Amino acid sequence: MTKKQKKVLIRIIISVLLMIVLNFIPVYGYVRFILYMIPYLIIGYDILRKAFKGIIKGQVFDENFLMAVATIGAIIIGEYTEGTAVMLFYQIGELFQSYAVGKSRRNISELMDIRPDYANIMQDDKLVKVDPDEVEPGSIIIVQPGEKCPIDGIVIEGSSSLNTSALTGESIPRDVSTGDEIISGCINMTGVLQVKTTKEFGESTVSKILDLVENATSKKSRSENFISRFARYYTPVVCYLALALAFVPPVINIFAGNAPLFSGWIYRALTFLVISCPCALVISIPLSFFAGIGGASREGVLVKGSSYLEALAKAGYVVFDKTGTVTEATFRVTEIYSSGMGEEELLRYAAYAESHSSHPISKSIKEAYGRDIDLSFINDIQEISGQGVIATLSDDTQICAGNYKLMKRQNIVCDETDKTGTVIYIAKNDVYAGYILISDVVKKGAKEAIRKLKKEGIKKTVMLTGDRDLVAENICAELGIDEVHAELLPDQKVSLLEKIIENKTGNGKVVYVGDGINDAPVLKRADIGIAMGALGSDAAIEAADVVLMDDDPLKIAKAIRIAKKCIRIVYENIYFAIGIKFICLILGAMGIANMWLAIFADVGVMVIAVLNAIRALFVKKL
């Protein structure tokens, strides 16, 4: 609890004790008025001050004005207890709301407590702490166990496990060693790391994420805009209605020859004012979105504003990029077929043939082999452009490794396979020995992610990719994606997405999910752009409306579920608050509702709405 909240709590306690004492003291007249003014001013002086300032600034019609008028009016007509009680319960509600908002902010700030305080650099053989802003790209920094990595970079010495939970929501540590990239904001858990920085602090991942979260609530949703407009017109209307309720019926009574009964109608008008205060709406709706964004951040999903959260809740179509989105974007050996020799021997010959190449296909073969290659065993390597390589080993063995065109060129008899992926045919001394299949592996959880999306009510899933038709079709069949368009250039992706948007049925929004680098134009064009695995990607953070802190496709369905829950809570609060107030306003105008019911209609409804809003912070597992 903050100092300010503690002070309010002390004022509440003092006022409650004084009111209890006053109820047992038989005092009347001016003495009673003076004694009740003590707890009233203790609990309400700040509300009266705000109301007065609002009047001076011309911003008259707000909740402070309503509370001031209602309570001062109640005291004028002699209802000291009720006037003080209205102010007391209003402050209790405000205290509760302040605590709830503070809790939401703390949850987000604790989650996003990734801003590093310093960076370690070596100066005169000593470790010196400096401001991360002072560290230039290309500098060497030291990250010790327990410290946050302050700036993006590449590990040049050491190995360790990193806690990335604050960034990705993933509790499993990530292992890094020499040559691996490391992003700012993660916590070094074990070994000492020397890191060569690749960015300035202001351009690093941690800075971009913090900026994104800090500005997340700057873009208001349609629901929030509605509440702002509603309160702007609603407050003066109810004030004029209360004024009419206080004076029109007594005037009519005077003309009818009856007693005016001003005090009774003024009491009704004051009750009407207390009931009409729109605090529940004005407070709970932004708090619901704030809690929703906080709950999403806790799960590793950054939403750039409440407007995007509202749009995401209406998602009806999800369009995917392939590489890096539903696949790993890394080539791996997925199958080895040998003819006349063992698989290990075939892989060994392929690795020696590809030993001098840095192509991703060659790297994947060498990684699959996993052993040191004795380069002295290789006499010569001839590269055939667009076909493959021919290697001559020191024992005069000749190895051909390449595509089917290379086999035909060398007059090697073999059957062409129709396997999905890149096929490397291997021949030893002009005799076909087998093939190695290299594929871009489907991400773990991608199939489950598609199933979860359909469970969340997504009407159609589509894949847009620049890869070959056969590869794309096989992946879509494996994952259960409804429609596929392959061999596309970036501008063709935009055109196809526009067709999907034009031809969609109903009000469902079109979501595009990409890796955020090559897909920036499509991310911008979609109703909602979601960047997958976009940590450290400037293009993703700039182009996307929602950024997933890791590349888990299951987070897409989770983001939609969070958005739907948040919007459901927003509308629950709108209907509940307006419904209860409307009923109580009618009862107040008819003289059935007293000031105590008015207190419930104001403070009680606000507390219930705030409690409901806090639910958006918590999301059930998929």
Image (cartoon, grey):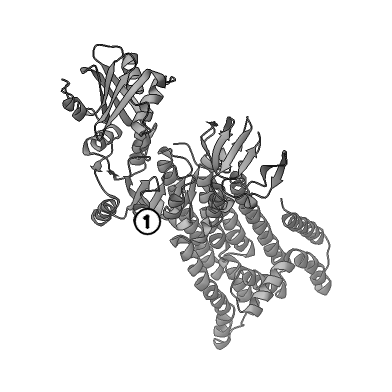
Left or right relative to 588: residue 461? left
Residue 587, percent from left and from top = 53, 65
Q: Is residue 186 above or below residue 218?
A: above
Q: Nearer the viewer, residue 587 or 199?
A: 199
Q: Is residue 226 above or below residue 9?
A: below
Q: Is residue 401 visible?
A: yes
Residue 602's quadrant in the figure? Answer: bottom right
Residue marked by disc 1: 524
* Above or below, 155 relative to 523: above
- Taking 501 as reference, is 223 left or right? right
Residue 336 in percent (x, y) is at 30, 20
Inspect this view and state whether residue 186 appears. Answer: no
The crowd level at tag 1 (other Cα within 10 Å; few <14, some 14-19, many 20+) is some
The C terminus lies in which quarter of the figure?
top left
Total number of numbered labels?
A: 1
Residue shown at the point (58%, 50%) measured from the top left: 201
Q: Which residue shows up at 26% across the image and 37% down it?
A: 472
The residue under the point 35% across, 34% down is 359
In this view of the protein, which residue sits in the foreground, 165 or 396?
A: 396
Measuring from the top left, give residue 495's x and y in whole percent.
Answer: 26, 55
Residue 456 or residue 539, whichever sits in front: 539
Q: Position of residue 503 (x, y in %)?
A: 23, 54
Q: Nearer the viewer, residue 315 or 144?
A: 144
Amino acid type assigned to the residue bearing label 1 in the image? Lys
Whether residue 237 is situated above or below residue 38 in the rendered picture: below
